[in-house]
Amino acid sequence: MTIINHQKQDKACFHCGLEVPSEKSWGIDFDGCWRAMCCPGCEAVAKAIIDNGLSSFYQKRTAYSEQTDSIPSELEYYDNVQDESNSPSTEYIETTLIIEGITCSACVWLLERHVRQLTGVLSFSVNYATRRALLKTKKGAIRLSEVLAAIQSVGYRAFPYDSGKQFEVLQGERKDFLSRIGVAVFCGMQVMMITVGIYMAGQDIDADMLSFMKWVSAFLTLPVLLFSGMPFLRSAYRDLENKRPGMDVPVALGIGLGFAASLFNTFNGQGDTYYESVCMFVVFLLSARYVEFLTRWHAVNSSERMSQAIPLMAKKIVENEGVKQVSAKALQVGDVVQINPGEAVPADAVVLEGSSHVDESILTGENHPLHKKVGESLLGGSHNLDNTLIAQVVCVGEDSTLSTISRLIERGHSEKPAWVERADRYASVFVLLVILVTVGTAWGGFWQGNENWFSIALSVLVVTCPCALSLATPTAYTAAMSSLFDKGIIITKGTALEKLATIKQVVFDKTGTLTQGTMSIENCEVFKSSFEQQESVDIAIGLEQFSDHPIARAFKQQKPVVVHQVVAVEQKNGAGLSGEIKGIRYYLGSENYVREYSTLTAVKQSKGTQVYLANEERVLAVFEIHDDIRHGARNIVQWLKGRGKYVSLLSGDKEMPVTWLAKKVGIDDAMFNITPQGKLDEIDRLQVAGKQVVMVGDGINDAPVLAKADVSVSVSGASQLARSSSDILLMSDDMESLQQVFQLSAKMNGVIKQNMLWALVYNIGALPLAMAGYVEPWQAALGMSVSSLVVVLNSFRLRFTLPVTKVRDVTELSRG
C-alpha cells in the first residue's frame, strides 16, 4: 500500500497513486479540481464512488487504493493477443469477448452502459443468448486489459473469444448446472418426504418428533440454499452492489426469506415452515435455466461448427522441397496447397489442377456436393470428397469467407430491436415494483392481523418474478437465427427478421441475383475490319481483370493469346471501365457507358447482356453474354406474389434481356437501363410513398442500394462489400431459401407475441390469486418455473419448424 504524497499528487493517479501517462486524459472533476487517473478502470471506479454519494472516502482515506483489482496482471496478456489479431491498417479494433456471470437482461444493460462510458470505446453490445460481446475500440486509445478490468470491476468476468475456451466454459457451466440440480433434487426429495409424513400424521405426531423432523428439514435445505441456490444469491448481491436490481433479486429474496422464516419458526417451535417450497423453487428454477442453457448450447454449436471448420494443418507445395506440413494460419496469398480426398480446404483458393466434388454444406447448407474444376473457387472450410486438388490460396485471415461470415453472424447476434433495449433498461424498475408489491402485501396482511401474512407475501414475491418476461424475446431470436444458419442463411442484423414479415415491397436485381452469375461469352461481333476477334477478346480480358462484377467472370474464364498490360484503369460503378494498352485507351461496358466516349451505331437486340468494346474513335466489338436463370427464381417470385407481396425488378441491363427475364420468372414491374443512382432514387421514391422495401441483390454496384433498403438480402456469390451492406445472407444457390427467411420471420414474431402474452397473463393473472392467499409458496415456485420453461420450449420450436414446401422448379421447364 502506497502512502499519499501530496507533493506528487499532480503526477499520481488520484485513485491508486500510480503514475499518470502524459499522453492520456483520464480523470474526473472533484472538489472543483481536475483529478487525473492512470487508466479508465480507476476512472470508472472513482466515478462510481462519487456518483453513489461516497465522496467522503477520498477525504478520509490515509492511503491510495490498491490498483491490482483494476487491471490484474493476468489481463495484460490479452493486449498482445488483440494486437496480433487485428489489421494494422484499420483505425479501430473489433474484439469478440466471452462474458461470464450474466443472468438477465438487466445485466446486459449494466455492462453495455458501463463499458460504453470508457474513453476510447466506440461501441459495445452484448448478446444475452450466447453470452458474447462485440467490442469496438479506437486504436491506441484504450487497452483490451483495461476494458476487461472495467467489466471485472462491476462483478463480471470477460476474456477474448476463443472457440476452445468457449467450449470449455460451456462444459464447465453444464457440469455446474447438473451438480447443483443434483444436490437440489436429492435434498429436496428428502425434505418433501418429511413434509408429506408430517402432513399425513396431522395432530397425532409427537411435538419432539415434529421438532426433530423440522430440524432435519432445515439441515437438508441448507445445501440447497448455499450450494444449489448460490448463483442466485451471488448474482443478487452483485446487482444490489451495482444498484441495478435484476431478476435474481426477487429470487434470492424469496429463497432467503423463506429459509430464514422457517428457521426462526423451527427455533421457536411454532408457526409454518417453508423448507419444501425453498427446495422446490430452487429445483424448478435451476431446471428452467438449464433448458435455457441448452438453447444457448445449440446456438453456439451452430456457429462454432463454422469457426472449427478450418483444419489446423495444411499441405503446402514448396518449390524444390515438395509437400510440407504447415500451420493453416501461416498460409499466405499465392501459396499453393495440396488437398487430398477427405481433407478440409485450409483457405479460400482457386483450383489449379484436378477436379473433384466438394461439400460446402457447412457454409451454404446445401446437401449436394458441388463439382469443382480448374479455375473454380474453393471455400475455406469446405471438404474435398473425391480426388486430389492442387489449389492456390487467394484469401486468408480476416478477409476470408469464413472470417467475414463469422463477423457478420456476431453482428447479427449482438443487435437488438429498440423496444428490447428499452425493456433491458427498465428491467430493474420492474423488479423494484415486484418488491414494492410484495412489501405492500406483507404490510397489509400484518396490519389486518392475518396469520398467514408472511406466506402470502412470499407467494406474491415468487409468483410475480418476471423471469419468463425477460426470456420471451432473446430465446426466440436465438432459436430462429440458429435454425436459419443450419439452412445456410446468415442473419447479420437481428432486427431484420423482425421487420421482414410485415414488408410488402420486394425488389430484385437481375444479374447475379435472379440469374446464376455463371456468365459465358456466347458471341463476339467485330465492327472494324482490321481488328481480329481474338484481339478484341484479349483486350477485354485484360480490362476485366480489374473488375469484380459478375459479367467479368465470363472474360476471366477465357485464356488470352496475348496478355496485355493495362494501366491507368478507371471504373464507373455498374456501367463499365477503361484503361490504357500501349498508349491507347479502351472502354468496355454497357451501351450507355460506351456512348459517352465513342460513336455507337445501332446494333441488333439480344436477350443476352451486351458488352461493348471501344476506343476513343469508334466501337470495336460487342460481346453477347448469357447467364442461366438462378434455380428457384421463378418459384420464389410466384410464392411472394401469392402472399400479397409486390415484386419488381431493377436492372442496368438493356430492355430486351430484362423484359425476357422478367417474363420468365413472372415479374410484371421491370425497369431497365437503370444506373446505380437510379436504383437508389427508386428505393427512395418507394420509401417516401410510405412503403418499406426488401432489396435482394448481388455485386458491388448493389451495395449502396442494399444499405438504403429497409431490409437487404445478398444472394450466394455476393461481393464482400455487398455482404457487409446486407442484413441477410443467402449462402445457397437456391433462391427458394428466401422463402424460408420470410416464413421463419413471421413464425418468430408469432412466437415472441405468444411468449409475451403468456408471461404477462401469468404474472398479472396469478398476482391477485397470490394476494388473496389462494397460492401456496410451493405452488408459486412451480408456476413461476413452469412459465419460464414454457417460454424457452416455445422458442425452441423455431429450431425445428421450417414449413417449406419444395416443388419442382418450373424455371427449368421454361428456359430457352
Image (cartoon, rainbow, N blue to C red):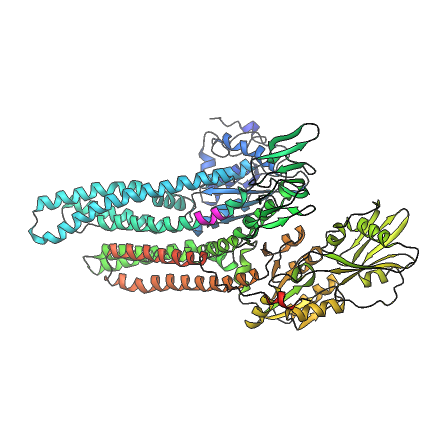
- Image position, residue 383 (x, y; %): 57, 44
* The C terminus lies in quadrant: bottom right
Judging depth in this view, the residue of 429 and 332 nearest the camera is: 332
Judging depth in this view, the residue of 539 and 369 nearest the camera is: 369
From the viewer's perspective, tell me whether residue 806 is left or right of residue 698. left
In this rendering, does residue 495 appear at all? yes
From the viewer's perspective, tell me whether residue 685 is left or right of residue 429. right
Check the image and report above or below for 209 versus 586: above
- Image position, residue 776 (x, y; %): 23, 57
Q: Residue at 48% of width from left, 38% of height from top?
A: 165
Tell me where the magenta segment starts and ends, as one range. 297-302
Majority SS type along the magenta span: helix
Check if residue 736 falls in the magenta segment.
no
Residue 325 occupies which quadrant of the picture? Answer: top right
In this rendering, does residue 113 appear at all? no
Check if residue 299 falls in the magenta segment.
yes
Check the image and report above or below for 51 versus 801: above
Check the image and report above or below for 659 versus 303: below
- Image position, residue 457 (x, y; %): 27, 56
Mark count: 0
- Image position, residue 620 (x, y; %): 88, 58
From the viewer's perspective, tell me whether residue 416 is left or right of residue 584. left
Judging depth in this view, the residue of 30 and 98 nearest the camera is: 98
Residue 682 occupies which quadrant of the picture? Answer: bottom right
Q: Residue at 12% of width from left, 53% of height from top?
A: 200
